[in-house]
Image (cartoon, helix red, strand yellow):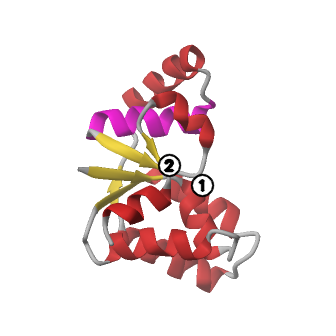
Amino acid sequence: MSYLIDTNVVLEFILDRDRQSEAEGVIRLAADRRIDAVMTDFHMDAVLIVAQRFLDWERLVKLFLLMAKVFRVYYVSLKDRLAAIKVGGSMGLDYDDAVLYICAKRLGAHIVSYDRDLDKTGIRMEPGVLLNRFP
């Protein structure tokens, strides 16, 4: 089983938010190769766009390299993007959530996210639930 990691999981970890330790646990599972953790290039960019407001360039490079090392990268194709636009409206998802959904369907993966809007997909998993599966 693959697990597609949403932007908010990484941001919780690097920005020292309320669920940092839980997010760190997910990242550790990925780093230790206990799970097949995937992140799209699109969502890696989203992490960097937010993180640049809080990190200097040197730390931003380190973050990018960490993500590239820890996660298997799924490159979002034009076909994926078009499918996301089409499905977003019919499912009531915003574009970035629709991209996650389409990519997860292509990968046969669960989406690991704190975003409850993704409950509409039927394949979202809270990070804590994932951690409980791998004690």
Q: Residue at x 34, y 72 (%)?
A: 29
The residue segment tinted magenta is 94-107
Q: What secondary structure is found at the residue carrying circle 2?
A: helix
Q: Position of residue 47 (x, y in %)?
A: 59, 61
Q: What secondary structure is found at the residue carrying circle 1?
A: helix
Give the position of the C terminus as an image quadrant.
bottom left
Residue located farthest toward the right when viewing the structure as drawn: 53
Q: Is residue 129 above or below residue 23?
A: above
* Circle number at residue 46: 1
User: Does residue 14 show up?
Assistant: yes
Between 73 and 2, the one nearer to me in the picture? 2
User: Does residue 77 show up?
Assistant: no
Q: Residue at x 44, y 34 (%)?
A: 101
Between 69 and 7, the one nearer to me in the picture? 7
Q: Quadrant of residue 31?
A: bottom left
> Does the residue at mark 2 contact the one at mark 1 (Cβ under 8 Å)?
yes
Question: Mark 2 highlights which residue?
Answer: 42
Direction from residue 126 to residue 134 in the image, left or right:
left
Amino acid carrying label 2: it is Phe
